[in-house]
Each structure stands twice: as C-alpha cells, then as structure tokens.
Image (spheres, grey):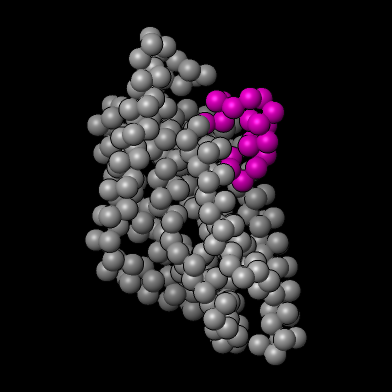
Amino acid sequence: MRKYLFIIKTTFIDSLQYVSSLLFRFCGFAIMMYVLTSLWRYIYSDGTGVINGYTFSKMIWYLLLAETISFGSGSNVSSSEVKDTIKSGNIAYQINKPYNYIGYVVCKYMADTFVRFMFFLVISIGLGFIFAGAIEGFNYMSILAGIPVFIFAILIVGLIKILISLTSFWVEDSKPFQHVYNKIVLMFGVFFPLEMFPKLVGTIIRYSPIYGISYGPAKLILDFSGGLFRSILISQLITMIVLLLIIKTVYRRGVKKLNVNGG
C-alpha cells in the first residue's frame, strides 16, 4: 500500500507543475460551452419553459457538470501512456516491478485526474453562474452525495480507457477505439441527458456505464434524491467490478502472449 501512496503523491506533485497547460484546454472548453449554451438558448427561445423536465438553467448546468467529468478525466495516463508502454515493449520491464502494473496506472491516473478535475470544476461553476445563474431548487445534500459519485465516475472512465489501451497487446493502435468511446459518451451522456432520447435508447443508456459516468452524477446535483443516489452508486459499483474482472483477464492474457513471444 505504501508503494501506491508514494505513486499518488509523486504524480500529484508532478501534475501541479503543469496546471498552466490546462489553460489551453480551458479555452476549448469555454468555447464549446458558449456554443452549446447559445444553441439551447435558441431552442428555448420559442417560449418553451421546460423540455422533458429540464428548464434552460438545468440543461446548461447538466452540460457543464457532464463536461467537467469528460474534460477532467482526460488524463493520458490511462490511454496514450498505457498504449505506448505496450507498443514500445517497456511493459516487459513494468510487469517485473514490485507492484501491480494496473494498480500503478490506476493510482497515477487518479492523482493526475484530481488536479484536472478540480480545475475544470471551478471553471464550470463560474461559467454556470454566468450562463445560467444558480441551480434551481438546489439541495446542499447533493454536494456530500456527489463526492463519492464523481470519484467513482472518474475511476470508471479510467478503467474503461485502460481496458481499451490493453487491446494494444493485439492491435496496432488502440487510439481509434478511444476516439469512438469518447464520441459515444459525448453524444449519449454529455450533450443530451437520458430523458431526451427515445424510451428504448434511454433504457440502454440507463444500464450502460454512461449512466454512472455522465448522466447520473450530473442528474444527482440537479435533482437530488436518496433513491437516485442509491441507484447511481449501485450502477457504479457493478460497473467497476465488471471492468476490473475484464481488465484482469485481458491483462493476464496479454502478458501471457508477451511471454510466449519472448517479450
């Protein structure tokens, strides 16, 4: 355990040195939110006060909260770094270190993501008040409930990206799969909340990881309830268990393939 705490500490300190580089991502984030806000303002301008349970204010806050998770979990540790380690052959040295490689990546990813997430969270809150004002009917209990939910959401994103990166044991480049995954989450979890989709699509989203990494956390802040909180946590815990089991299996087979080929 001490080894992993050291990894978290060193990665966190290292990430603090590159906070200024996040300003460039902030520009893209702010521009995207301005465009989306303008689009939704036009849609609501016809006098429609509520669309599928969302006022204009709640819709903008949903976009901001969901985008915060998307941008905040954009660390390259779980994607490019894992992919490059496998393709370069350095994975052969990593698996012989006195720690589990997957555990090492997860700790490093979470430490790096914490800095990014907190940066974008502060920015999102500021933009939210500028674009949409205060959250209507805000329940302060959602702040306490949101802490574990947002942490688990970020962790699930990292596990999914690690799993995709592990396909580099077999494919030339896992980057296209990462790209497809990002677009699916943006379309079905960030740009539109679950209520905006047809019933069948909404049901699929509810039982997919998207529910726990985008829709659930954002919805919890907007419309807090104990039932919703339990539903999201159960979904997240099940998703994490399934992902860890799959990652463990894929990683073992990948290492076995590496050993058989004389890696």
Left or right: where 103 falls relative to 7: right
Picture coordinates of residue 122, whole percent (x, y) = 29, 46
Residue in front for this viewpoint, 180 or 76: 180
Q: Is residue 200 magenta?
A: yes
Q: Is residue 83 visible?
A: yes
Picture coordinates of residue 84, whole percent (x, y) = 52, 74
- Characterize the magenta stretch by its predominant secondary structure: helix
Furthest residue to the bottom? Answer: 262
Q: Is residue 144 visible?
A: no
Picture coordinates of residue 101, whole percent (x, y) = 57, 76
Q: Quadrant of residue 45?
A: top left
Furthest residue to the top? Answer: 47
What residue lies at 69% left-to-right and 82% top-to-bottom? Answer: 258
Picture coordinates of residue 109, whole percent (x, y) = 47, 65
Residue in front for this viewpoint, 193 or 180: 180
Say which quadrant the C terminus sits in.
bottom right
The magenta segment: 193-211
Vertical side of 155 occupied by 183: above or below = above
